[in-house]
Image: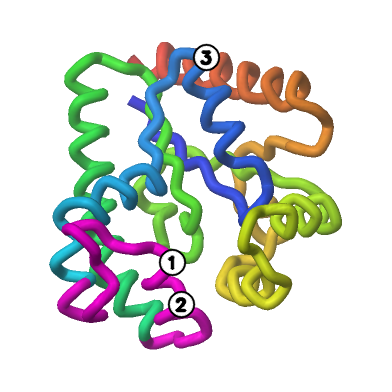
Amino acid sequence: MIVVGLTGSIGMGKSTTARFFLEAGVPVHDSDEAVHRLYAGKAAPLIEAAFPGTVTDGVVDRTALASRILGDGEAIRTVERIVHPLVRADADAFLEVQRNAGQPLAVLDIPLLFETGGEGRVDRIVVVSAPDEVQRARVLARPGMTVEKFEAILARQVPDAEKRVRADFVVESDEGLDEARRSVEAIVEKLREEARSDA
């Protein structure tokens, strides 16, 4: 089975691209969705122990947590030390299920693939990309997003230009949904062919 790492900086269109992989019949593990589940499960007591008052009724209050850790590098690293291993275990369990089902391809949607050294966990890397001004407009249109918050997030991400260089495939997300969907379908076809020849 070929494991595909799907990544891209904030606002690049990664979630939409992940949906196109699903539509093409490729199972996708969504790290953000896993975090949501973990924040209502295994991660909640660990987060509460580290940051008292950020959990309500057994669920991490993301807004409360964000306000506690924004701009505090050590606090952010503490959250990452708690959450990343749990997400990784969740992804490993997902891959095991797909392998046992005989899937030729599976996608790990990992926002911070390069930042967390995740390249070693995948066979191929797909980076979703768009011009800076498109990215900025998309992100600043999000509810509750500020320029300060956007800049803080960007500062912690590997630059888009570097991600593109390190990718096996790049999906340009600013050329319309149909074009992005066609890009994904072409990638899936190529990798399925590769999986067949390796079998």
Of pointers 2 and 3, the one earlier in the residue sequence: 3
Q: Secondary structure at mark 2?
A: helix
Q: Nearer the viewer, residue 69 or 83?
A: 69
Q: Which quarter of the rendering shows the C terminus? A: top left
Q: Secondary structure at mark 3?
A: loop
Say whether residue 171 is left or right of residue 96.
Answer: right
Residue 63 numbered tag? 1
Q: What amino acid is found at the position of numbered circle 3 in the picture?
A: Ala
Question: What is the magenta range?
Answer: 48-74
Residue 29: image quadrant is top left
How far separated are the C-alphas under marks 2 and 3?
A: 38 Å
Q: What amino acid is found at the position of numbered circle 2 in the picture?
A: Ser
Q: Which residue is mark 3?
A: 24
Q: Are marks 1 and 2 in contact (CB under 8 Å)?
A: yes
Whether 66 is among the magenta residues is yes
Instruction: For marks 1 and 3, give the one nearer the viewer.
Output: 1
How far separated are the C-alphas under marks 1 and 3?
A: 34 Å
Whether 92 is among the magenta residues is no
Say whether residue 36 is left or right of residue 101.
Answer: right
Give coordinates of residue 17: x percent, y percent: 60, 32
Q: Nearer the viewer, residue 89 or 66?
A: 66
Q: Which residue is mark 2?
A: 67
Q: What amino acid is found at the position of numbered circle 1 in the picture?
A: Thr
Q: Which quarter of the rendering shows the N terminus? A: top left
Residue drawn at 77 percent across, 47 percent down: 130
- Residue density around tag 3, few if under 14, some if 14–19, many if 20 or more, within 10 Å: some
Q: Secondary structure at mark 1?
A: helix
Of pointers 1 and 3, the one earlier in the residue sequence: 3
